[in-house]
Image (cartoon, helix red, strand yellow):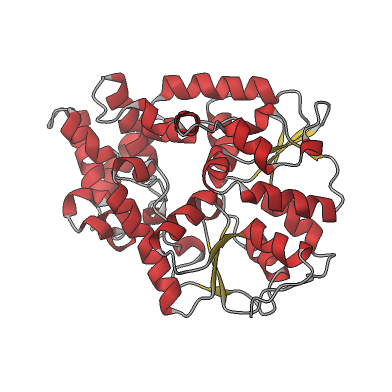
């Protein structure tokens, strides 16, 4: 993002009659004008003009953003609010004025502090025979997957066995973090060091298969923008399965009302809507249904932009908005394609059945006898 574009977005947003107001999960949760997209963009403009001082209090408003891009859907001018707010976070970090510590945004540190590093979680979830040193195609589950839903890795390899995807392997580099949360929080020096290490560790592979929408966005958009590369070919694990499973017949299709939630980074950011739905349809007895907010209008789970660390109650409200909608529609199974979404929804609604898309596919295609009716 160049400086002139940055200024145009701020000016356009500041003089807009807040057409996006209803879309922001943060302002909807907190119910105050000061955290609407318009107000946050106006504040950044005032900070850059010197009208308001940059301090811990003003910097905190830049962290009231999920990076979900929901405000962009109704925007007539394609203003990228998260880009501006994330840049403001980086400015606060450089000035030593971020209200948060970098350690808060390091999932590898979180895993170590819990006594189970990401590589240990990977070894517990992936079959030992899939650790192949000379492999050319590497699975990168993502730190969030290993932290919160490592069973997705086991389910993926069960499907890989069924589909004879013998080339798909894991290695120590599979347990690395691409640095999404550090980047989003504005700790760019730490992010760049982590990103360069990641690039060097995966350089020997021909292709990376990713499970995290955040990682997909980082490697397809942010790394190239920052000229961090070259990188191997990138493929989504969901896309890989959608292509292969169309030739298979589900052994135990799910019977009940199934609804799919579009993750922000897979949907609005990367515009992948039909592939996950097509894959899910293979595992269901009836076509999956939609939530009230779906496709480009999908409501964020609350797990992006580091908000679950900086404003947990606000993040929880966003998740509960989705799960309340799912329950009101009579949903039997809520399906996501992001481990962070799955975690947020399970915590918001323990009584609602929530599964990752890959786990749903794994049970439908690899378990011979199941009664979900």
Task: Tell me the residue at 43%/30% (across/down).
Answer: 182
180 or 52, nearer to the observer: 180
Q: Quadrant of the N terminus?
A: top left
| Residue 359 shown left or right of residue 349 in the figure | right
Task: Tell me the residue at 74%/51% (across/down).
Answer: 240
Residue 219: quadrant of the picture: top right
Task: Tell me the residue at 12%/31% (across/down).
Answer: 51
| Residue 328 shown left or right of residue 43 in the figure | right
364 or 20, nearer to the observer: 364
Say how many tags the image has. 0
Task: Tell me the residue at 35%/44% (across/down).
Answer: 307
Q: Residue furthest front?
A: 115
Residue 23: quadrant of the picture: bottom left
246 or 121, nearer to the observer: 121
Q: Position of residue 369 (x, y in %)?
A: 76, 72
Is residue 300 visible in the rendered image? The answer is: no
Q: Quadrant of the C terminus?
A: bottom right
Residue 328: quadrant of the picture: bottom left
Q: Is residue 37 above or below residue 245?
A: above
198 or 147, nearer to the observer: 147
Q: Position of residue 336 (x, y in %)?
A: 55, 59
Q: Position of residue 229 (x, y in %)?
A: 63, 24
Q: Position of residue 22 (x, y in %)?
A: 30, 63
Q: Is residue 3 above or below residue 281?
A: above
Is residue 246 visible in the rendered image? The answer is: yes
């Amino acid at each position: 993002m160049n400086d002139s574009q940055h200024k145009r977005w701020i000016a356009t947003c500041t003089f807009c009659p807040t057409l996006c107001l209803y879309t922001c999960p943060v302002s909807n949760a907190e119910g105050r004008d000061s955290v609407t997209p318009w107000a946050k963009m106006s504040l950044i403009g005032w900070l850059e003009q010197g009208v308001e001082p940059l301090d811990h209090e003003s910097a905190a408003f830049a962290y009231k953003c999920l990076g979900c891009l929901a405000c962009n859907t109704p925007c007539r001018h394609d203003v990228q609010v998260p880009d501006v707010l994330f840049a403001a976070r980086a400015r606060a970090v450089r000035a030593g004025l971020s209200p948060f510590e970098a350690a808060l945004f390091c999932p590898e540190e979180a895993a170590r502090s819990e006594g189970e590093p990401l590589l240990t979680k990977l070894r517990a979830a992936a079959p030992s025979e899939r650790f192949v040193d000379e492999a050319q195609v590497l699975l990168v589950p993502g730190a969030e997957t290993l932290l919160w839903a490592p069973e997705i890795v086991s389910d993926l390899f069960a499907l890989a066995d069924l589909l004879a995807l013998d080339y798909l392997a894991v290695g120590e580099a599979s347990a690395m973090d691409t640095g999404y949360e550090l980047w989003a929080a504005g700790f760019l020096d730490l992010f760049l060091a982590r990103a360069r290490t990641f690039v060097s560790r995966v350089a020997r592979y021909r292709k990376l298969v990713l499970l995290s929408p955040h990682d997909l966005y980082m490697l397809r958009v942010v790394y190239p923008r920052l000229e961090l590369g070259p990188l191997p070919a990138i493929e989504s694990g969901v896309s890989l399965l959608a292509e292969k499973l169309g030739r298979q017949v589900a052994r135990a299709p799910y019977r009940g009302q199934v609804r799919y939630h579009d993750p922000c980074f897979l949907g609005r950011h990367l515009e992948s809507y039909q592939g996950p739905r097509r894959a899910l349809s293979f595992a269901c007895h009836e076509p999956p249904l939609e939530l009230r907010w779906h496709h480009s209008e999908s409501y964020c789970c609350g797990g992006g932009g580091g908000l679950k660390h900086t404003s947990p109650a606000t993040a929880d409200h966003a998740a509960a908005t989705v799960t309340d909608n799912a329950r009101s529609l009579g949903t039997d199974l809520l399906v996501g394609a992001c481990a962070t979404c799955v975690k947020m929804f399970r915590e918001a609604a323990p009584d609602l059945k929530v599964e990752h898309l890959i786990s749903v596919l794994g049970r439908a295609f690899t378990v011979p006898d199941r009664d979900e009716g």
